Image (cartoon, rainbow, N blue to C red):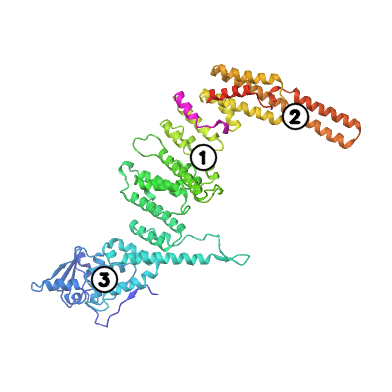
């Protein structure tokens, strides 16, 4: 279809054109030379020397003004606030004079508005400018998405008249419907038959929708209306998200390049309005936009001091998919007054709270749905799985280690972030121990009470052997924490000895019981420093004993290999007697070893003494 309308009038003698006399009359070149002008129209300071008859025959407004001043023989009319300016009025005047011109997508909005302003309707002349411009808008522009976007862009300078004439609404509806049709067509192109003969959607993701960049030229209020119309028409959330990212990239490009102070900027500026508009248009579906884009919007919202509701909405969305975040995402710069920290710890704390509340709410829903207790654990998109919790715990431990060196970071904020996750989220406490150690190293002025409060976050039973060995020699930890670490390491060594010496039914010798009783009794009676030294000494002795037992176990395994070879070579009684000797050596290995390798259960008194050690180290 032709995108331009040519209007031809009955043949007439070619007009004698009058050359322009000055820059203020440059639009008069198409006026008849042989007919003197009887009216002057002023538009934005430009004078048009015209004739009453062609104008009043098609323009109701000019006809009315001339009729009102018939007695005074009015010769000059000033048209104030004429939509489209001088260029649009020139085209309207040419139409009155029967001079041909083209209606295109770049001038149809202005022509619709100026024809309404001048009252160029069917009441004064058939096939007047108003009806022809609207006909082109409805039959040509609204059938093409690109042209609809162009007309909508032109309408930005024609408000509120363009809105009153439904030009904006018609273009927005056309854009939304055409985008939906394009998407349906692309979906059909992705349909293919599987090997079994069934029709399914191809996983191949084609090129982004071509109209996404076209919409980036729109003003933010028009862009909002277009996106909302697309949502109502059912355009894919992924396409909406791609369009939002493209629009943000265009409108917020200079955000980080400007050197203005943050104090001088606010949410009332253009960038702040754009950020809040984009946040309000975000699809409710997860993964419709990348998580990094949400963090970028949050940084922009903090920088521009956007509304609290805007920032909270972003934090809620981020919290729902926090397991996909990286450490760099969480390093949100702090730009608030009175906050000397480099990063916004409060924002991360709120994001973690959203993540934990989501976990709690999902658990409550499961209890309500499965009151009999026979339900299964849900790993759906709205329920964080254990793997997601583990990922987030590692992420937060890395984040704590990153912000811990800040000297202005308050202990209460550090603890609040560390405690935001449920206890079962951390299966290993190595990362948490590392972050606390970094904090203690950077804040050496902490009191002993604060150090104990900080170390209560660590479950020393969940430390790896390497982390436990480091903690046992860490002078920055408070003494009770070190004693507890040593005691746990001692228990681990005893358990290791029991695993290498599995004869649990054998009764341990009496000197083993007395050693444990004495050890516990001394631990309860000695001072903390002596208790610490005693535990470290016992720890070293147990390690040496474990090494000796492993060496003897290797010797036994070699002898066992020799026994198997002897069994294959001979079935005589000599072999049986040799085998009996080997068994005897095995029994000697078991009873001849150190009493610390025994795995028999301790006496009641030894259990009480052990409990004393635990109570002293808590």
The disc at residue 607 is: none
Of circles 1 and 3, the one toward us is: 1
Q: CA distance from mark 1 to mark 2?
A: 40 Å
Where is residue 229 shown, x and y percent of the image? 38, 62
Q: CA distance from mark 1 to mark 3?
A: 68 Å
| Category of crowding for the residue at label 1, using alpha-carbon neighbours closer than 10 angstroms: few (below 14), some (14–19), many (at least 20) | many
Q: Which residue is mark 2?
A: 553
Residue at position x 34%, y 63% in the image: 152
Of circles 2 and 3, the one toward us is: 2
Counting every numbered tag in the picture gives: 3
Q: Secondary structure at mark 3?
A: helix
Which residue is at the far right? 572
Where is residue 112 shown, x and y percent of the image? 28, 69
Taking depth in this image into account, of 448 and 264 the one nearest to the observer is 448
In this picture, residue 344 sits left or right of residue 592: left
Q: Is residue 101 visible?
A: no
Taking depth in this image into account, of 109 and 373 the one nearest to the observer is 373
Where is residue 302 shown, x and y percent of the image? 37, 44
Q: Pick whichever of labels 2 and 3 is earlier in the sequence.
A: 3
The disc at residue 393 is: 1
| Category of crowding for the residue at label 2, using alpha-carbon neighbours closer than 10 angstroms: few (below 14), some (14–19), many (at least 20) | some
In contact (CB < 8 Å): disc 1 and disc 3: no
In contact (CB < 8 Å): disc 1 and disc 2: no
Where is residue 59 shown, x and y percent of the image? 20, 73
Q: Secondary structure at mark 1?
A: helix
């Amino acid at each position: 279809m032709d995108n331009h309308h040519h209007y031809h009038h009955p043949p007439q003698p070619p007009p004698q054109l009058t050359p322009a006399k000055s820059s203020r009359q440059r639009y008069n070149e198409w006026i008849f030379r042989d007919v003197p002008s009887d009216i002057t129209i002023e538009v934005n300071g430009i004078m048009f020397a015209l004739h009453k008859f062609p104008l009043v025959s098609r323009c109701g407004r000019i006809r009315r003004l001339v009729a009102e001043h018939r007695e005074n023989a009015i010769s000059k009319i000033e048209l104030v606030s004429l939509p489209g300016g001088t260029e649009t009025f020139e085209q309207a005047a040419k139409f009155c004079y029967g001079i041909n011109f083209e209606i295109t997508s770049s001038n149809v909005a202005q022509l619709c508005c100026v024809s309404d302003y001048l009252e160029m309707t069917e009441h004064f002349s058939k096939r007047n400018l108003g009806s022809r411009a609207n006909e082109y808008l409805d039959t040509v522009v609204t059938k093409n998405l690109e042209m609809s976007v162009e007309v909508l862009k032109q309408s930005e300078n024609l408000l509120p008249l363009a809105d009153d004439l439904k030009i904006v609404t018609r273009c927005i509806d056309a854009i939304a419907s055409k985008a939906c049709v394009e998407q349906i067509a692309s979906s059909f192109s992705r349909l293919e038959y599987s090997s079994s003969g069934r029709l399914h959607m191809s996983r191949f993701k084609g090129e982004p929708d071509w109209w996404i960049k076209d919409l980036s030229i729109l003003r933010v209020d028009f862009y909002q209306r277009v996106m909302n119309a697309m949502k109502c028409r059912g355009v894919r959330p992924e396409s909406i998200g791609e369009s939002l990212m493209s629009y943000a990239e265009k409108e917020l490009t200079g955000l980080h390049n400007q050197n203005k102070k943050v104090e001088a900027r606010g949410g009332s500026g253009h960038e702040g309005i754009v950020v809040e508009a984009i946040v309000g248009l975000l699809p409710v579906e997860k993964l419709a936009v990348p998580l990094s884009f949400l963090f970028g919007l949050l940084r922009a919202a903090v920088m521009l001091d956007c509304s609290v509701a805007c920032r909270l909405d972003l934090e809620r969305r981020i919290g729902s998919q926090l397991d996909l975040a990286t450490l760099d995402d969480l390093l949100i710069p702090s730009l608030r007054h009175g906050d000397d920290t480099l990063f916004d710890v409060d924002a991360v704390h709120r994001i973690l709270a959203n993540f934990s509340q989501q976990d709690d709410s999902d658990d409550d829903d499961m209890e309500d749905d499965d009151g009999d207790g026979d339900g299964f654990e849900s790993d759906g998109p709205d329920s964080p799985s254990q793997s997601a919790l583990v990922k987030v715990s590692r992420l937060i431990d890395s984040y704590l280690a990153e912000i811990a060196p800040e000297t202005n970071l308050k202990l209460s904020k550090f603890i609040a972030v560390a405690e935001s996750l449920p206890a079962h989220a951390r299966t290993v406490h190595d990362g948490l121990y590392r972050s606390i150690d970094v904090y203690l190293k950077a804040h050496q002025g902490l009191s002993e009470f604060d150090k104990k409060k900080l170390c209560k976050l660590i479950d020393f039973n969940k430390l790896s052997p390497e982390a436990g060995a480091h903690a046992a020699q860490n002078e920055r930890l408070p003494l009770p924490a070190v004693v507890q670490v040593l005691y746990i390491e001692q228990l681990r060594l005893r358990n290791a000895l029991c695993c290498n010496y599995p004869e649990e039914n054998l009764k341990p010798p009496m000197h083993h019981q007395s050693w444990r009783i004495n050890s516990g009794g001394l631990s309860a009676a000695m001072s903390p420093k002596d208790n610490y030294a005693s535990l470290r000494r016992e720890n070293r002795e147990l390690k040496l004993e474990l090494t000796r037992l492993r060496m003897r176990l290797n010797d036994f395994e070699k002898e066992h290999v020799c026994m198997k070879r002897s069994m294959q070579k001979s079935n005589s009684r000599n072999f049986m007697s040799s085998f009996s000797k080997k068994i005897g050596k095995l029994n000697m290995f078991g009873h001849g070893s150190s009493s610390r390798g025994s795995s028999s259960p301790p006496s009641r008194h030894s259990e009480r003494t052990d409990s004393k050690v635990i109570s002293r180290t808590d």
